[in-house]
Image (tube, rainbow, N blue to C red):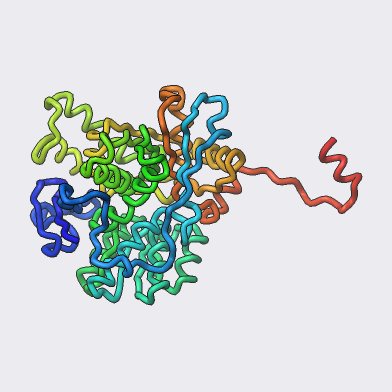
Amino acid sequence: MNYYFRCIDCGKEYDGNELEYVCPKCSSAQKRMEPTKGVLEVLFDYKKLRKPVLPLKDLSLLPPLKVGPTPLYKDTRLAEGLGFKNLYIKDDTGLPTGSYKDRASSFVVAKARELRKNVIVCASTGNAATALSGMCASVGLNCVIFVPSSAPAAKLTQIAIYGANLIPIKGTYDDAFELSLAATREFGWYNRNTAYNPFTIEGKKSAALEIFDQLGSKAPDKVFIPTGDGVILAGIYKGFKDLKEIGLIDKIPQLIAVQAEGSAVITGFYNSLILSLSKDGGAVAHGSSFDRLTMSSPRADCHTIADSICVSAPRNASWAVKILKETKGRCVTVTDDEILSAMKRLGSLTGIFAEPAAAASAAGFFKIAEELDPKERIVLLITGNGLKDIPAAQQTIRTISPIEPDIKELRKIFK
């Protein structure tokens, strides 16, 4: 399959075999702890395509673990009282390692096999690492994983069970990211990091293609997306963009980036961009005020119960804010209390157990539901299983003390 790259910053195009990670021109100005410069978008000769494709020579290179399609539920109970007749839940909690990150990791492992790479490295808050570890285990590849030592114990356990080389870091996800880049240069390992390896976005776009199929070859009007680095946002955008370029849909849905209030860096970038564009005449181009915004310093005090979207220096910030501008999207910030409330509401009304970051999309929907058109087709992405963070879930529930096995004791409870 012929494909090529285009830098999302300078617009320069490269042959698909010419580069491995990022645009050399733009990345030459890269500094530590800043959004990645020179992120590459994978593009095709769309005039020759009749359906979306993946940039892979042989699909048999994909790991045997089945990654999708995942269910798209048309919800009634969650929307009860809100008047929404076309609310859908895209449930990725049942993927092989329990998160959306299986989509990217599966494809990167396939690409590594195509390129004859023996070791894959990545930095992660937990889910990307568990996904990569599981996919590598299924095909016998080695992987080296850098994660903050503060990652939930369940995720660290998953990584270890899959046999990965797990390296906990005394620091943040951003520290782990920088170390993974240094390790890539030092040892020549193949790097899986999103907003660095362009093929991760190609894996993440699969959810958009599934949604299109599951809606009867139609696109939704809005998609709510949990957002940290902005890479799932880019994946959903890329899937719908491919569909639009081929002529299967007329427009890309409005994308709603939902961020935790304690880690809303992309939200800050986007709001600043909109303000600047109102002064600059609306242009989003290389050399505009946009680029000066993405040079902003990372936020040093990021904190949220939703560890999967807790990022101080969002690596895909540049592309994410451009995507939001193009799709007339918006950012919604939610508090940890709103996230926990959404976890409980989602579980008790739909039977879907989401981890905090995954429940953020539902929290964002609840927060702005009154502003939305109830006739629109709206999709909530639920990106990770709640079993990955039991301590967080325990904050949302109340349990009774053990009782004697006596009907009298039971009567006291239900009286």
Q: Is residue 281 visible?
A: yes
Residue drawn at (31%, 58%), measured in percent from left and top?
175
Residue 163 vs residue 239: left or right? right
Is 213 or 278 nearer to us in this picture? Answer: 213
User: 58 above or below 216?
Assistant: below
User: Where the N terminus falls, by quadrant?
Assistant: bottom left
Give the left or right position of residue 48, taking residue 407 as reference: left
**379 or 121, which is in the foreground?**
379
On-image quarter of the C terminus: top right
Does residue 331 lie above or below 389 as drawn? Answer: above
User: Which of these two is toward me, 137 or 222?
Assistant: 222
Q: Which quadrant of the figure has residue 56? A: bottom left
Residue at (42, 34) in percent of width and height: 378
Q: Quadrant of residue 396?
A: top right
Tell me where residue 121 sits by quadrant: bottom left
Is residue 312 visible in the rendered structure shown here? no
Q: Position of residue 142 (x, y in %)?
A: 35, 75
Q: Is residue 365 above or below residue 410?
A: above
Q: Position of residue 225 (x, y in %)?
A: 38, 41
Q: Position of residue 326 (x, y in %)?
A: 22, 34
Which residue corresponds to the image point at 10% horizontal and 46% vertical from the top-left?
Answer: 10
Residue 365 in the image: x percent, y percent? 45, 33
Q: Looking at the image, which residue is at 34% across and 34% down?
A: 331
Number of numbered discs on residues: 0
